[in-house]
Image (cartoon, rainbow, N blue to C red):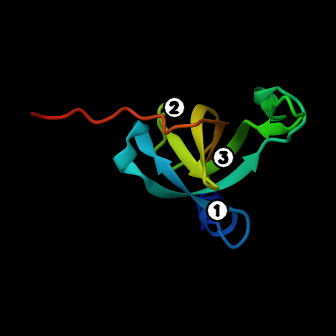
């Protein structure tokens, strides 16, 4: 067994193991509401401190009451998953998150920056008459 094949196996058996690090979320590919499918990811909600979404410190909304609301996070997914930048939406812990951009990719994993949204970022299917 080569190191490359062992790393591919480790991604699924270790990192994307729902008994350890990963969780299952709903992925709406290409902004299609009917395409909702399960995807195993590692979810890193950004820290509440800070405001720089690129650095992973978290984009935070401050309410008048002083409450902070997390507004961004990172998803680690297998490189074999089909992800369309700027069109995909994810349902994570009963909250909707829209794909902002793919910020990293290697032979086995991708890192996705997601931001909180209030609706599925979809394009509705056209009616065929």
Locate residue 85, reporting x and y percent. 51, 31
CB-based contact (under 8 Å), mark 1 and mark 2: no
Question: Could you tell whether 33 is left or right of 102 in the image?
Answer: left
Residue at 9% across, 33% down: 129
Q: Quadrant of residue 48?
A: top right
Q: Which residue is mark 3?
A: 75
Q: Are marks 3 and 1 in contact (CB under 8 Å)?
A: no
User: What kind of element bears circle 1?
Assistant: strand
Picture disc at residue 85: 2
Q: Mark 3 or mark 1: which comes first in sequence?
A: 1
Q: Quadrant of the N terminus?
A: bottom right
Read off the residue under disc 1.
23
Among the 4 quarters of the image, the one containing residue 65: top right
The disc label shown at residue 73, or none: none
Q: Nearer the viewer, residue 54 or 66?
A: 66
* Image position, residue 10 (x, y; %): 65, 64
- Visible residue check, residue 109: yes
For the question of whether residue 108 can be seen, the reply is: no
Q: Residues within 10 Å of mark 3 (few under 14, many from 20)?
A: some
Image coordinates for residue 84, horizontal then vertical, percent = 47, 35
How far apart are the two marked residues, 2 and 3, measured between alpha carbons?
A: 13 Å
- Is residue 85 placed above or below 73 in the rendered structure? above
The secondary structure type at the circle numbered 3 is strand
CA neighbours of label 2 inside 10 A, class few (<14), some (14 to 19), many (20+): some
Mark 3 and mark 1: span between their CA atoms? 10 Å
Cα separation, mark 1 vs mark 2, equals: 21 Å
The mark tally for this picture is 3
């Amino acid at each position: 067994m080569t190191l490359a094949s062992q790393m591919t196996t480790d991604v699924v058996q270790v990192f994307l193991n729902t008994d350890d690090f990963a969780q299952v979320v709903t992925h709406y590919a290409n902004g299609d509401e009917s395409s909702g499918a399960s995807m195993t990811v590692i979810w890193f909600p950004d820290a509440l401190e800070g405001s720089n979404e690129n650095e992973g410190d978290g984009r935070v909304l401050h309410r008048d009451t002083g409450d902070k609301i997390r507004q961004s996070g990172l998803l680690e997914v297998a490189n074999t998953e089909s992800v369309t930048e700027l069109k995909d939406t994810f349902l994570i812990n009963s909250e909707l998150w829209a794909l902002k951009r793919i910020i990293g990719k290697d032979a086995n994993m991708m890192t996705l920056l997601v931001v909180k949204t209030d609706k599925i970022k979809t394009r509705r299917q056209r009616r065929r008459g």
